[in-house]
Every structure is written in structure tokens, then in C-alpha cells.
Image (cartoon, rainbow, N blue to C red):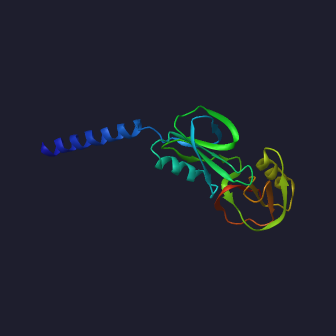
Amino acid sequence: MVRAAVIRMLFAVLTSAMIVLVQAPLPAYAQANFDRIGGDYLRAPVRSGDPADCAMVCERDRRCRAWTFSYPAGPDGAFCWLKNTVPQRTHSDCCVSGVRGAGVLEPRGRGMETSTDRSGGDYRSFEIKGGGGEERCKTTCDNENKCRAWTYARPGYAGRDARCFLKKDIKPPRRRPGFISGVVR
């Protein structure tokens, strides 16, 4: 009888734990290609060029409620904008934005590896002007039989302008903010 009571108690505890886990909120993440305009109280350079560093600065500042990381747009490099409000997000390729407590979630899929460099094995590279550079870099690689992989560097990460590196060899991926890579064949 005591054994049955212990089993019922254990079952009740496990059931309660499962209910709590199912109802727990999912973690919030920052989003690439979104800006949060307004509410700025601090603008600071991000020498690493990594949006995750901007998110960490916000975490450590009690006044911060949201943040926007802007990719390098000139010789001054990347910047982190801390905000004392949570402005509405607006689609923009300039930035990665989030709210305090959110990690950085970068887009995956479409044959692209965000924040990834496949350094080496290049047979040619070229500048890309205008938007949609990672798609143009991938498409160029798709259309050249010699190309097995590619890496796109956002403006300010491998020179002033965006750059596409076409590769004859597939090199191992390495995390590197500001770069997008892919393997074609």
C-alpha cells in the first residue's frame, strides 16, 4: 500500500513537471534584417563586427530594453544602438535587432550558412554593389562548373564594398560574423 502511494506521488510530480515544461515560454531571439528605429540612448562601435556582442552589451546594461546592431556602412565600422524602449521592428538589411534577454538567431536554410566563412580555395573574387549580394554570389557559383563553394562578405568585412569569393575547393566552415557561405557541388 505504501509502495502504491509512492508510485502515485512520483507520477503526480512527473506529470506536473511535464505540464510546466510544455507551458514554458520559448526563448526570444534577435532577428537578422530588422531594425528597431527610435528609443536610442547609446551608440557604441562594435569592433568585432558580431551582433552577439551588441546583444551582450544590452544584457549588461540595466537601462537597455532593446538593441540594434548595424553592419559596417563606412570606415567607422559596425555599431550597436542601445534603446530604453522596445520600438516596433522594421525590415532592413542594414541591421540585426532584438530585445533584452534574446539571443541572436541568424537565418538558416536556402543553401546559405550565415556568419560562416569558408576561407581558402578561391579561384576568383569580385565586388558586388547594391543589395541581394549573397543571392548573386550563390547564383554565380551555381552557374560556373568550376565553382564548388562560395563566400559572400558584407560591405566593411573584407574591404569597403561587398565581395564574393568563388571556390574550387570546399574548405571547412568557420564562424565569422559578416560572412555568408554555401556549398554548391
Q: Residue 151 or 90: which is nearer the viewer?
A: 90
Image point 63% across, 35% down: which residue?
Answer: 37
Which residue ends up furthest to the top in the rendered image? 88
Residue 10 on image: x %, y %: 24, 44
Q: Would you say 14 lies left or right of 156 here?
A: left
Which quadrant of the view contains residue 115?
bottom right
- The quadrant in which the C terminus is found is bottom right
Q: 119 above or below 59?
A: below
Residue 121 on image: x %, y %: 78, 68
Q: Residue 11 or 36: which is nearer the viewer?
A: 36
Image point 57% across, 50% down: which residue?
Answer: 54
Image point 86% across, 59% down: which residue?
Answer: 145
Image point 80% across, 60% down: which residue?
Answer: 165
- The quadrant in which the N terminus is found is top left
Residue 5 on image: x %, y %: 17, 41
Q: Would you say 33 lies left or right of 131 here?
A: left
